[in-house]
Amino acid sequence: MDRTSVILPVIVGAVLLGLSSVFIVDEREKALVLQFGQVRAVKEDPGLGFKIPVIQEVVRYDGRILGLPTQPLEVTPLDDRRLVVDAFARWQIVNVVEFRESVGAEGVRAAQTRLERIVNAAIREVLGSVPSQAVLSEDRTGLMNQIRDLSRREAASLGVDVIDVRLTRTDLPEQNLAATYARMRAEREREATDEIARGNEAASRVRASADRTVVELTSDARRQAEVIRGEADAERNRIYAQAFGRDPEFFAFSRSMTSYERALKGTNSSIVVKPDTTFFDYFRSYSAPGAAIVPAEAPAAPAGDTSGEGAAVPVAPDAGGSAAAAAPVATE
């Protein structure tokens, strides 16, 4: 029998045995060497590791920071206003031996289940000690830090470190949303009503001030107009008096002509006065040659006549030389 045929299998077996005793740890991993379920070695640094083939095995765990989103959780703050809260935790394995002893062979999945219960308990404890307004406010850093610290203390026995906990959602339950929206709508409507009332009040003040200003300006304009009108009347009377003083006869003539123009207009009114009254002085002075004055029975004067006398108007004789009867003069 050839010696080579015997040595070659031995060498191959030795190589395979040597390779099975070597394992590589990645920089993102942490490894445990177990022998019959007991931890024999810990390998946290990246590089080569050794184990006894067949008897020992290598268990690897993720050494990076892991995330844990929690399920929606209903909590009750101090004011008994129920809220639905979601959280997100960041955690990392820091002690692989304790981690192995705590979660067993299930590893990360069992750790997440237990860690979620720890985080939920911390959320209930912290948020249950504050009013809902503090939970719903934008600044919740203090509350999240309290939840993180409490979760970290409880999770230390698992060999993990809770790095951070963030509240991702804080809402009201579905059954309370309608009532909450109705209350918010009522509050906004009340505020809108108050704003409208204040606006109407301000508008009324502005309108009243404008009306008062209009009345004041109108009154002042009328006062100034009356003053100007009085001054104009005084100036007119002064001019009349000055003109009368210069030529009284012309002034009397002008006033008589104006009186004739106003009184002897063809309208539905009529007056009857005596022909020798002062009103007809200028008619007598400038009557036609041969004109005769024929008296006539005068009807009663109208109520507006202050002379108390009747008169006939002088007329010229006709072709036969007889004078026509005096007719009433249509005047205004």
Image (tube, rainbow, N blue to C red):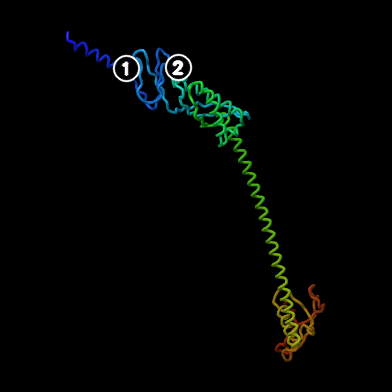
- The C terminus is located in which quarter? bottom right
Q: Amino acid at mark 2?
A: Gly
Q: Is residue 194 left or right of 5 when viewed as pictured?
A: right
Q: Is residue 157 left or right of 200 when viewed as pictured?
A: left
- Residue at the extreme left of the image, as rendered: 1
The residue positioned 44% from the left and 28% from the top of the image is 65
Q: Nearer the viewer, residue 250 or 108?
A: 108
Q: Is residue 187 left or right of 163 when viewed as pictured?
A: right
Q: Which mark is residue 243?
A: none
Nearest-to-viewer mark from 2 and 1: 1
Q: Quadrant of residue 304?
A: bottom right
Asked whether residue 12 is in view, the answer is yes
Q: Is residue 199 above or below residue 274?
A: above
Secondary element under disc 2, as helix, strand or loop, is helix
The residue positioned 34% from the left and 21% from the top of the image is 23
The residue positioned 72% from the left and 79% from the top of the image is 235
Q: Which mark is residue 20?
A: 1
x and y percent of residue 103 in the render?
46, 18
The residue positioned 74% from the left and 88% from the top of the image is 246
Q: Quadrant of residue 292?
A: bottom right
* Residue that mark 2 sits on: 104
Asked whether residue 314 is in view, the answer is no
Q: Amino acid at mark 1?
A: Ser
